[in-house]
Amino acid sequence: MKRRVCIAILVMGFSGLVAEILLLRELLIVFSGNELSIGIILANWLILEAFGCFFPGRMVEKSKNKLETFAVITILFSLSLLIAVFLTRSLKSILGISIGESIGLLPMFYSSFLILLPVSILHGALFTFSCRIYSMFSTQDASSAGRVYVYETVGTIIGGIVCTYLLIPFLNAFQAASGLAMLNFIVCLVLLAPYWKTGLFQKTILVILSVLVFFFGYLVFASQSDKLHQYSIQAQWKNLNIVHYQNSPYGNICVIENQGQYIYFLDGLPTIITPVPDIPSVEEFVHLPLLAHPEPAKILILSGGAGGIINEALKHPSIATIEYAELDPLLLALLREFPTPLTESELNDERVQIKHVDGRLWLRTTPNKYDLIFIGIMEPSSLQANRFFTKEFFSLAEKRLNEGGILVLGAPGSLTFLNEELRNLNSCIFHTLNRVFAHIRVIPGDGRNVFLASDSQEISTVDEVQIVRRLDERNITANVMVPWHIEKKLHHGWQDWFANFIESSTQKINYDFKPLGLFYSIAHWNALFAPAFGQFFKQFERIDLGIIFLLFILFLLLYFFLRSRNKRFFRAGIPLSIVTTGFAGMIFGLIVIFTFQSIYGYVFSWIGLLVASFMAGAACGAMLITRGLARIRNGLKLFIRIELAIVCFSIGLPVLFFAVNALVGGQRAIVFPRMLHLIISFICGFLIGSQFPLANKLYLKNSASLSGTAGLLYASDLLGGWLGGVVGAVVLLPVLGLSGTCVTAGLLKLASFIVISTQPQSASVRR
């Protein structure tokens, strides 16, 4: 029977990770691929698991039929996952948000909280039930909770690998959720089979499980779950004419057709429109920079080139080669599957060379140089996009430009709605460019400002007379780029206007590992669509390490003051340490994900492996300590040493990632840094996982309830993770960056280290 219980715990861990990744993936589509939502989603998952672990899970002591109750909770968990997937796809309709519109951080928080609520709470309750059930068939001591933790973690590792290589590439969310439900029902059947003759309640549960296995088997093997998938997509896209909907390793692509016009949505945002794009915007973005160059021959377009940009560039007779880098091959495959005269002429021209690679990695690995480099991304609205607006990227682009070459990019602009957030966003991009290039020219506009950056002074001196002459010499026909429009856009007064526009704004620089451009982009969006929350959000920019250090000092002063007054005030030293460890663990996990995205730009295809690597480290750490619990004489001393190790690791983590980033230099130097990400993720998990079983042993010295202790400490861990997810994703990483976030996590762990180190051993383990 013990073996069956172990299998049930493994499947419980497997199911939790699969459910988490499936819902994370679905929510990211609704949240427009904004990676900051990863922290919010994971944080909500953890806090709800903590609630389920600590409150509903504690009913295990009162339950007379523990195995049967475990099966009932598993049934509810499996069914709630299917409902959560459907609700996620209907979320924009529920919130009254139109197709193509982004969702703000505050709606991200409460909507994901409500959708995850039943799934996470039920899964959290399963952990506490698992601890009690396992102890029924083994020794009832501290190692019991530690072993359950290990078994669950091993299940999550398997779940991460299966999600990466099987579920996400080959199954839709409903197929995966239905298959997962059937697996859980089969495991519960096997678990309860020996109790068939025990009583009516047991027989009823077994009959229900048998019916559910048959029903979900029908859904999976008779393709009925695919019908649910199609129905939910129609609800998600409000019955528009969807001609294709598919997840790829890099995101979600939805193609909508209306009277021959195709709109390609990437993670819910319109990206390419064919065959008639936004002609004024495209012509202005392409022709003005190309006409500013005396003889453009070789250009590079990074993302978004199809659907107009390539077509306009090809009108210049001097163009010999256009290299077009697009990360997701599915997007280009769909452009060919739904051909239009525009895309056919672009993608089939012999001068166009298509590269199925991330644009930034292409710049790092190619020896080629270019006359112009176009960034086809509108703004740094995500970490993936922000990496094309940083000082590091601009330095890389500058090295790949020929003499007199021009870097071209856009940013949101307006000639009338001149709010502080828009000023900060444009000022941050301008000053970041100014750190690398000698000359910058900005062409303001309503909707988009066009930035031209070069080491040649010509972009600053070229005027409308030269541009119009080149337009005639190259015999270019355009709808908007006519002489009077060019004279208007290049009037010398616009440069003075833009200088005044950003004069009193921020002069901070946008870096890979300190993505302030992303922060200002979110602040600008909030100012437009959520002004009340936007006023609160922009205050986060004031946070710096000085404030963090001040809070650290104030905490220590308060601690020592209260400690001198009341010796028992800080009896909760162990739970406090687990809270800070949970916080650090979430921060470490987010840093691994965010740095991977900043370096490579395709974290969604690796997120399962990164999570699995972290959980593998946690399992190894917990297993190592669990096996040695009986031989550990001074558990508190070892616990304190692990605290100190986490502090040191927090401070040293930025150095590791800066070194990893430096290693990405050539084709052969790409695989090894990615492996280092997995190794670092494993080490993070190892340090975090090693504390939990040891904390159980220390706390159980003055506690009679094994499940109560496991529930309290597990809930403490998840509470810390929730704080780390919300604060880390929304505030620390965008504002303080990699180094400041790691220092913050290190200071928090240092605070708990001081608390636990200055308590008598008896006080630290008392309830």
Image (cartoon, rainbow, N blue to C red):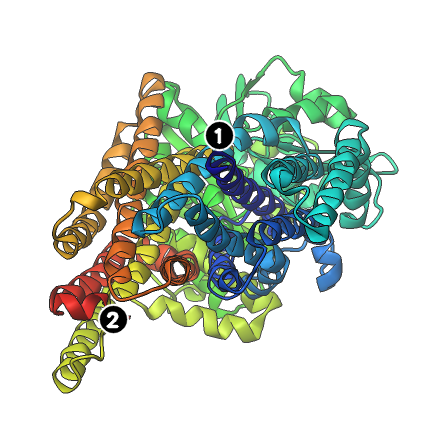
Q: Nearer the viewer, residue 548 or 419?
A: 548
686 horizontally vs 198: left or right: left
Q: In percent of the image, x 56 and y 58: which residue is there?
A: 121
Q: Nearer the viewer, residue 34 or 651?
A: 651
Residue 711, label in figure: none
- Quarter of the picture containing the C terminus is bottom left
Locate residue 676, reporting x and y percent: 30, 30
Asked if 572 appears above or below 467 in the picture, the reply is: below
Q: In percent of the image, x 32 and y 53: which residue is there?
A: 737
Locate residue 163, reporting x and y percent: 55, 32
- The answer to whether residue 468 shows anywhere in this view is no
Element under disc 2: helix
* Circle count: 2
Locate residue 190, reporting x and y percent: 61, 35
Element under disc 1: helix
Q: Residues within 10 Å of mark 1 (few under 14, many from 20)?
A: many
Q: In percent of the image, x 20 and y 77: which residue is there?
A: 554
522 horizontally vs 273: left or right: left
Q: What is the distance, in whole Å, between disc 2 and disc 1 at their CAs?
A: 41 Å
Compare marks 2 and 1 and give the one earlier in the sequence: 1
Asked if 490 appears above or below 415 in the picture, the reply is: above
**Amino acid on which disc 2 is placed:** Ile
Residue under numbered circle 1: 161
Locate residue 701, reporting x and y percent: 24, 62
* Pointer 2 with pointer 1, Cβ within 8 A: no
Residue under numbered circle 2: 547
Q: In percent of the image, x 23 and y 38: which residue is there?
A: 656
**Amino acid on which disc 1 is placed:** Ile
- The answer to whether residue 390 shows anywhere in this view is yes
